[in-house]
Each structure stands twice: as structure tokens, then as C-alpha cells.
Amino acid sequence: MSHTELASQHCQPRKGKEHALDAAQIAALLQHLPGWQLSADGKAIVKDFKFADFHRTLGFINAVGFMANHEDHHPDLEAGYGHCHLLWSTHDVGGLSLNDFICAARVEALLAR
Ligand SMILES: C[C@H](O)[C@H](O)[C@H]1CNC2=NC(N)=NC(=O)C2=N1
């Protein structure tokens, strides 16, 4: 599944272990998401984003927040002047589901130009 195919999908309610992706599925999906990495515990995907200044960082966070609310799937984020660390994981699954990859691809689409 390509990056644009992923980004064109919407999150679905995914609750329970049966929605957890296995290591091979995760590795295959990560290939379409440049800069995204598996977290140390293997339960999340993470990426650091850099921006020229604070207001661009906040603009990004607001755009991600709007998308996340629309998809009813929410990231962890940490930010400061010129940077934002995003983490996607599916709490209802206890690890990674397709929702995390859809949202990561949607974040990339926000930045595409
Ligand atoms: C009821 C609601 O759809 C669920 O609580 C959603 C909300 N947003 C969510 N976000 C994330 N990251 N993981 C979830 O499991 C999750 N569940």
C-alpha cells in the first residue's frame, strides 16, 4: 500500500488485539513513510518534525490536531520552538494498528507541496 493510498483511507474503530499489526506488516507500512521509525518498545511509530519558528510549529500542531479529531485518532506530541515530536499508537489495541499508519500518512500529506 503506497503512501497516498494510506493517506486516502480513514481510521476505523479498531479495538482489541486482533487489530494489532505484526512485525512484517509494520515493516512493510513503514517503507511508505519516510522518516517514521518504530519506537523502542515497538508499540508506536514516531517522527521529529523541524520548523523555522514557533508559529509554524503551532500551525503544524493545529493542522495535525484538526485531522486527528476528524479521524478520532489522537497522537502524543511534544513540541518546542521549531520542533515537534509526533507519536502514533493505538491505545485500544495496545500497540500499532492500521489507524496509526493512516494518520502518519495523513500528516505527510499535510506537508506535501
Ligand atoms: C472512542 C474513541 O473512538 C476511542 O477512544 C479512540 C479515540 N482516539 C484514539 N487515539 C489513539 N491514539 N488510540 C486509540 O485507541 C483511540 N481510541
Image: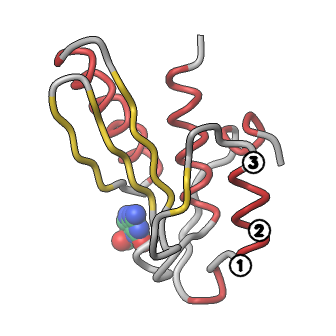
Disc 2 residue type? Gln
In this orientation, which residue lies closer to the viewer: 66 or 36? 36
User: What is the x, y in percent for residue 47?
Assistant: 45, 44
Q: Quadrant of residue 112?
A: top right
Check the image and report above or below for 28 versus 65: below
| Rendered residue at 54%/61% (across/down) | 38
| Rendered residue at 42%/39% (across/down) | 67
Disc 1 residue type? Asp
Q: Which mark is residue 22?
A: 1
State how far apart marks 2 and 3 are (Cα): 10 Å
- Say if mark 1 contacts mark 2, CB within 8 Å: yes
Q: Quadrant of residue 88?
A: bottom left
Disc 3 residue type? Gln
Question: Can you tell which of label 2 and label 3 is closer to the viewer?
Answer: 3
Residue farthest front in this picture: 40
Q: Which mark is residue 91?
A: none
Q: Which mark is residue 31?
A: 3
In this orientation, which residue lies closer to the viewer: 69 or 76? 76
User: What is the x, y in percent for residue 51?
Assistant: 32, 19
In this orientation, which residue lies closer to the viewer: 103 or 41? 41
Q: Quadrant of ligand 1?
A: bottom left
- Say if mark 2 contacts mark 3, CB within 8 Å: no
Check the image and report above or below for 85 versus 16: above
Q: Quadrant of the C terminus?
A: top right
Is 31 left or right of 51, judged from the image as shown? right
Provide the secondary structure element on which disc 3 rests.
loop
Q: Note whether ligand 1 is within 8 Å of mark 1.
A: no
Check the image and report above or below for 112 versus 22: above
| Rendered residue at 27%/16% (across/down) | 56
Residue indicated by mark 2: 25
User: What is the x, y in percent for residue 104?
Assistant: 54, 45
Provide the secondary structure element on which disc 2 rests.
helix
